[in-house]
Amino acid sequence: MAETSEEVAVLVQRVVKDITNAFRRNPHIDEIGLIPCPEARYNRSPIVLVENKLGVESWCVKFLLPYVHNKLLLYRTRKQWLNKDELIDVTCTLLLLNPDFTTAWNVRKELILSGTLSPIKDLHLGKLALTKFPKSPETWIHRRWVLQQLSQETSLPSSVAKGNLGPVPEERTQRLIQEEMEVCSEAAGRYPSNYNAWSHRIWVLQNVAKLDLKILLDELSSTKHWASMHVSDHSGFHYRQFLLKSLISQTAMDASVLQHNSLKNEPKDEEATATTEEPRINLTQLLEEEVEFCTDLINSYPGHETLWCHRRHAFYLQHHLNGKCPPNVTHLSPADCSGGTLNDLHLIPASPQLSQAMEVDGLNDSSKQGYSQETKRLKRTPPPDPVGLEMEHRFIDQVLSTCRNVEQARYANAYRKWLVTLSQ
């Protein structure tokens, strides 16, 4: 094992070169990991490549990570020169071991802007880092920056002529969206309630997919199985809530545009209409299916608070949609919500009555300053749908009569109390 600084330098340079050669031999590496190995037992490279999996023996990390870290800092402080190939290799090695080192990502940003490094390769590097560190915030932040660069290239009409993009921009955008969805799903599966992964997924829908209705519907369908296998993942179910509200908002927006165009008596281009026609969406049916989905999960997996919270949200949307929202709908455009995350779960349709009820008492009317917190809470919803409430109470009665799980009974009673506030 290396002991002197010269031996360490030789060792690390060899390991960095082995990692670079591994990517050259197999550009389809899809996972990285550490191989538990306290010390070097054989005179061989600590880099192991089996099929598409890259492993690093753990004994060399204590030499490798400090060395490449210091080497990059010396470069940034202009105390040591590194050529472009050395920069790519050093930052690649460093980020595979510590993807939250912001300086390394910034160096790669400069290489991308200079045309030295392909943005697609950086997306692949980030994907590999997320297989080991699925919650790494700096990796997700850099990934969004790269996607923004690719979106700018796609929007340039001359970029296709230069041969930089390969497929036509529409096909390339669809492929990027699909790849990002897969990366997010894999990261969410590796780390429970992975807020960073689900927030990134929302960002992609807002900024790359532009809240396209077809993509939103596909996401709602494709994440259903995932949600059924992760019934305690709050972030995953919040994502489904975002999808439902985005579908409501976008559908209302499209209806408003069509109504506006019809009032203006604008001429219709049949060919353009045929190519840009959006899928027809039955929002009532979607919400009913979501509530039924919650029913199945609650009965199959008792005692999970996430499922009850999601049911409350789905019923809330259903409650406001049934005869109360159209045609006056409050919504945000994609530009308005382009910076949203999982916390931006307020894009709900609203009638004038709901808009007024959702206002915070005291902000717009000084006469409301004396209202109690209980009054404020009860004013936040319009009159409930008696049929829907009756069905929910029946569901609660059925759960309480059959369950033996203490937590299940507690969540059911809490849900009943919430329903009572809707009817007051």
Image (cartoon, rainbow, N blue to C red):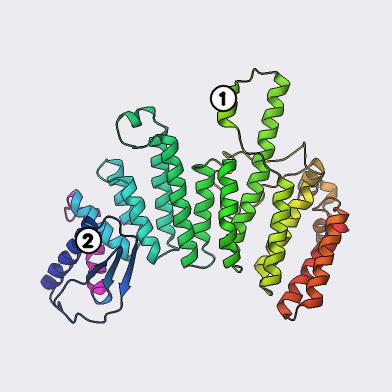
Point out the image quarter for the N terminus: bottom left
Residue 64 on the magenta span: yes
Residue 164 figure quarter: top left
- Residue located 29% across and 30% down the image: 162
Looking at the image, residue 90 sits to the left or right of residue 342; the answer is: left
Q: Label for residue 22?
A: 2
**How far across and how far down the image is residue 412, in percent?**
77, 71
Is any atom of residue 274 visible in this view? yes
| Magenta range | 60-83
In the figure, is residue 22 to the left or right of 7?
Answer: right
Q: In screen coordinates, is 200 left or right of 145? A: right
On the image, numbered disc 1 is attached to which residue?
Answer: 272
Q: Earlier in the sequence, mark 1 or mark 2?
A: 2
Q: Is residue 216 above or below residue 91?
A: above
> Which amino acid, by three-letter code, is at mark 2?
Ala
Residue at 33%, 37% in the rendered image: 166
Q: Quadrant of residue 409?
A: bottom right
Q: Position of residue 255 (x, y in %)?
A: 69, 33
Task: Tell me the residue at 34%/53% (across/down).
Answer: 124
Q: Mark 1 to mark 2: distance in Å?
A: 49 Å
Q: Residue at x 79, y 53 (%)?
A: 380
Type of residue at label 1? Ala
Q: Secondary structure at mark 2?
A: helix
Image vertical order of residue 256 relative to residue 11, above or below: above
User: Which one is in front, 374 or 49?
Assistant: 49
**In which image quadrant can residue 274 be found?**
top right
